[in-house]
């Protein structure tokens, strides 16, 4: 398989032109190879944000492969009624729907499909259009119904033939039906995938609501009880609680212990005693106690009002959680799953079992549908039997990790005066280096509280190395007293209450600088580190943070002050730090870019035929441009990693002109990463498109700039930062304990004690900095291997380009066993 760096636009076809094996991971799928096949796509059950992106991807990947694709409107009801409810989809008809919530092809309950005559009508309608491949987007009930329909197909076919409703030719040609599912559900209640379509957006609606309510609650010292959706699954409430620093959460999978009323009241009273002015409690609508008795929002309100005399209000979010424009994550998820579902159908044989396209870390995989459905049902069975440990296990690793992190943080209490021997006198330091990015504050908050709870002192180093060496006022270096660092308190112990509410705040409250350690002098830094007697150092930031930590690590041979555990937590919108698939801050930036691009395109609603050229941040890394291009439906995205020439630019202009003239498109979007090419600048591309598009479209330029670094952190970045800190503290404590000498000082120079904590696929891993350096392009500040480059052909295919083959994401030989996936 080619490395991502080899997957250039021109290389793909030359490398794989003679080995196009459909559906195999890393193999190229050529345009038009499935001409003549027909696909039907429908949405069923409750709507969820991101469904339209999935529908769009099915239509456009089907078009790319040469298939005829049909919308089946109003779900199963449309399949039964036929006629105008089953219409051929065109590339243009799927335009402009990605940013819309809900489902544009409709969803409806269908009693008729439950009866044999209804299923016969549905089968006949499909046969008349030769639709033998179905993409089902819905919940487990919708997917189960589709699988039963698939299993019944031979019987239905026989009855239709015997009744003379289909011809012998149709009977012979339509012998089997294949289905592939995508789970659209805001509850994330389907076992077998990390995330379902719509969950991320629903979490954003919850987060926005809690953030808004928190301001009024704080003003009046109120408690708010918010009921969120989740009749059978507490994922929304659980992750929402982590992201919003909620004081308590009730979920059906993990009911509170008996006597929870006393525990809750004691906890809230203790928090008010520390000066906290508000309390937020999240309740999943299906919450129960250990005996199966419902726990309601009003019940909790009455408890707080009667026992604590708190001014308490209840807010039921309801269908607000289903509304609004999809987040960037849900758009990209729908696009990737939609594309892979079409390929799964093209791979299918009469003996292929129904499968679901699922997300495993950053990869799309196929898992057996009925195995997932069975496991999902087993969760409810376990809860009905009171076996809540088994219910949590069956939910999967992601749910378990979220619950473990919540339980850890919820039990924390402000430290007492005493500390155990292993932590006594030990000081951890934390600092930010690099450009500000959302998620920095979430890491600091959790790291401080977890460390304090274990008896450690946490020194907050303000303003990066400036604060460590010189203090807040730079002029103090020449005019201030010798002990100016203490006067300006740039390195000071952080308190429990100081970090309250930090998770939801953007930027860097510790302050940050975009500089390298070597600029200040390694000797000076070592002197200050020794002066403050730091036993462990955490650096949160971007490539500068990683590079600075590496410089300190390499200086261990000369300075004992650096012979301590050093940990880097990647946090940059550029997502260009080695050792992690995702950096904190990138998700928030993608949402900002996607939202801005939506508004930019909307601004031209009354102006026909306009193309926007938008410049994104990222340095040399094209992650933001590529992923926001996928999320925003861009026609092209130019990045440094994927070399392009004037010929490519010219071809893209002609391609846009053709779409506008012949496909009914009115607006175009072209993204360019800020350092994509030194000569083909944003101005140059805008002028080129303006000149070559004369008479067909006009062109406008937008440089997004620092808007991409602003805003409040997304749910992902809040939750991710919290979990990274929860991993960092035990690692740091273990290193300190292991390498503390008899004199009480910490000393270690082993490579593994200077590491970066990042996410690889679905796992958080510690990677030694010196090992990561071997795969780093320091000139361009990039990892040599970047997983997201494999998605660039999909971006162009969805924009109707056909010159580049699609490289399949799904694993070799089709379907992954669910148990193996969860163990992995």
Image (spheres, helix red, strand yellow):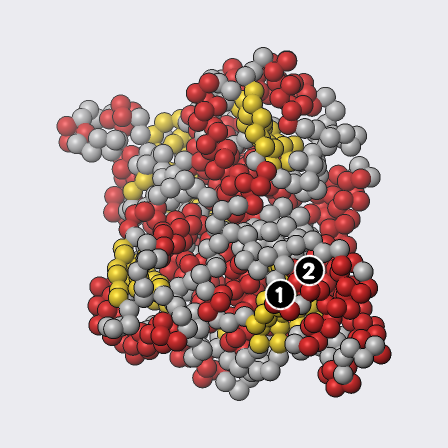
Residue 323 spot, x, y in % from top left:
53, 45
Residue 507 spot, x, y in % from top left:
36, 39
60 w.r.t. 498: above or below: below
- Looking at the picture, tell me which residue is in the foreground, 261 or 486: 261
Q: Is residue 465 rendered to the left or right of residue 582?
A: left
Which residue position is annotated with label 1?
Answer: 85
- Looking at the picture, tell me which residue is in the foreground, 661 or 296: 661
- Looking at the picture, tell me which residue is in the foreground, 82 or 592: 82
Q: Residue furthest left?
A: 479
Choose top left, top right, bottom left or bottom right for residue 400: top right
> From the image, which quarter does the C terminus lie in?
bottom right
Q: What residue appears at the point 75 percent right and 68 percent down from the top-left corner?
A: 121
Label 2: how many Cα within 10 Å (few below 14, some 14–19, many 20+): many
User: Can residue 759 be seen at all in this image of the molecule?
Assistant: no
Residue 253 spot, x, y in % from top left:
71, 39
Give whichever of discs 1 and 2 has the lower sequence position.
2
Q: Label 1 vs label 2: CA separation? A: 9 Å
Which residue position is annotated with label 2?
Answer: 77
Q: What residue appears at the point 42 percent right and 50 percent down from the top-left corner?
A: 591
Disc 2 secondary structure class: helix
User: Can residue 312 be seen at all in this image of the molecule?
Assistant: yes
Q: What residue appears at the point 45 percent right and 58 percent down from the top-left corner?
A: 631
Q: Is residue 9 rendered to the left or right of residue 221?
A: left
118 w.r.t. 403: above or below: below
Q: What residue appears at the point 52 percent right and 66 percent down from the top-left corner?
A: 57
Disc 1 secondary structure class: helix
Determine contact: label 1, label 2, CB under 8 Å: yes
Choose top left, top right, bottom left or bottom right for residue 467: top left
Label 1: how many Cα within 10 Å (few below 14, some 14–19, many 20+): some
The disc placed on residue 351 is none
């Amino acid at each position: 398989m080619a490395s991502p760096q080899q997957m250039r636009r021109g290389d793909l076809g030359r490398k794989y032109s003679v080995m196009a094996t459909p559906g195999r991971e890393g193999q190229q799928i050529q345009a038009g190879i499935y001409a003549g096949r027909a696909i039907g796509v429908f949405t069923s059950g409750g709507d969820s944000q991101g469904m339209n992106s999935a529908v769009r991807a099915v239509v456009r990947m089907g078009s790319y492969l040469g298939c005829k694709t049909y919308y089946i409107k109003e779900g199963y009801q449309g399949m039964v009624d036929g006629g105008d409810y089953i219409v051929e989809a065109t590339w243009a008809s799927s335009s402009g729907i990605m940013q819309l919530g809900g489902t544009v092809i409709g969803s409806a309950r269908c009693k008729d499909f439950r009866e044999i005559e209804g299923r016969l009508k549905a089968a006949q309608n499909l046969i008349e259009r030769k639709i033998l491949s179905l993409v089902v987007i819905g919940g487990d009930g919708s997917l189960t119904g589709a699988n039963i329909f698939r299993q019944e197909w031979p019987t239905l076919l026989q009855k239709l033939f015997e009744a003379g409703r289909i011809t012998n030719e149709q009977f012979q040609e339509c012998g089997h039906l294949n289905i592939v599912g995508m789970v659209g559900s805001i509850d994330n209640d389907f076992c077998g995938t990390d995330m379902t379509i719509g969950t991320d957006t629903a979490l954003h609606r919850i987060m926005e609501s809690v953030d808004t309510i928190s301001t009024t609650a704080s003003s009046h010292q109120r408690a708010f009880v918010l009921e969120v959706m989740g009749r059978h699954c507490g994922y929304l409430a659980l992750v929402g609680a982590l992201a919003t620093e909620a004081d308590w959460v009730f979920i059906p999978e993990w009911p509170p212990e008996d006597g929870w009323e006393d525990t809750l009241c004691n906890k809230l009273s203790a928090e008010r005693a520390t000066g906290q002015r508000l309390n937020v409690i999240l309740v999943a609508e299906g919450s129960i106690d250990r005996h199966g008795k419902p726990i309601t929002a009003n019940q909790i309100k009455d408890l707080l009002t009667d026992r604590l005399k708190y001014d308490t209000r209840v807010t039921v979010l309801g269908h607000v959680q289903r509304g609004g424009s999809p987040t960037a994550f849900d758009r990209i998820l729908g696009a990737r799953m939609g594309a892979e579902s079409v390929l799964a159908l093209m791979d299918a044989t009469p003996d292929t079992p129904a499968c679901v396209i699922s997300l495993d870390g950053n990869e799309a995989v196929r898992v057996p549908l009925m195995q997932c459905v069975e496991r999902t049902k087993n969760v409810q069975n376990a809860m009905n039997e009171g076996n809540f440990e088994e219910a949590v296990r069956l939910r999967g690793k992601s749910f378990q990790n979220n619950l473990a992190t919540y339980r850890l943080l919820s039990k924390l209490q402000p430290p007492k005066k005493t500390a155990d021997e292993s932590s006594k006198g030990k000081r951890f330091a934390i600092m930010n280096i690099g450009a500000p990015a959302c998620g920095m504050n979430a890491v600091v908050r959790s790291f401080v509280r977890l460390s304090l709870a274990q008896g450690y002192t946490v020194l907050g180093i303000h303003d990066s190395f400036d604060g460590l060496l010189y203090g807040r006022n730079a002029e103090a270096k020449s005019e201030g007293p010798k002990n100016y660092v203490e006067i300006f308190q740039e390195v000071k112990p952080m308190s429990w209450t100081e970090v309250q509410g930090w998770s939801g705040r953007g930027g860097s409250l510790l302050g940050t600088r975009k500089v390298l350690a070597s600029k200040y002098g390694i000797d000076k830094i070592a002197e200050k580190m020794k002066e403050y007697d730091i036993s462990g150092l955490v650096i949160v930031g971007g490539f500068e943070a990683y590079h600075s930590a590496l410089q300190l690590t390499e200086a261990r041979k000369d300075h004992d002050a650096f012979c301590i555990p050093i940990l880097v937590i990647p946090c940059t919108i550029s997502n260009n730090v080695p050792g992690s698939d995702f950096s904190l801050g990138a998700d928030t930036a993608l949402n900002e870019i996607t939202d801005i691009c939506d508004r930019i395109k909307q601004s031209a609603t009354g102006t026909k035929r306009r193309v926007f050229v938008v410049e994104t941040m990222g340095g040399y890394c094209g992650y933001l441009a590529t992923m926001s291009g996928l999320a925003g439906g861009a026609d092209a995205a130019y990045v440094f990693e994927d070399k392009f020439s004037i010929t490519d630019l010219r071809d893209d202009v002609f391609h846009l002109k053709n779409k506008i003239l012949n496909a009914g498109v009115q607006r175009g979007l072209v993204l360019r990463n800020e350092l994509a090419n030194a000569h083909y600048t944003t101005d140059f591309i805008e002028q080129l498109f303006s000149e070559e598009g004369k008479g067909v479209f006009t062109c406008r330029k937008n440089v997004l700039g620092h808007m991409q670094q602003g805003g409040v952190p997304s749910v992902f970045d809040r939750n991710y930062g919290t979990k990274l800190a929860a991993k960092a503290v035990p690692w740091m404590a273990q290193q300190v304990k292991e390498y503390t000498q008899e004199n009480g000082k910490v000393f270690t120079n082993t490579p593994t004690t200077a590491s970066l904590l990042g996410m690889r696929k679905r796992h958080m891993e510690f990677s030694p900095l010196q090992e990561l350096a071997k795969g780093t392009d320091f000139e361009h500040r990039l990892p040599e291997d970047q997983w997201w480059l494999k998605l660039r052909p999909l971006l162009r295919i969805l924009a109707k380009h056909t010159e580049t083959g699609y490289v399949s994401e799904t694993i070799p030989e089709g379907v992954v066993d669910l148990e193996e996936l969860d163990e992995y």
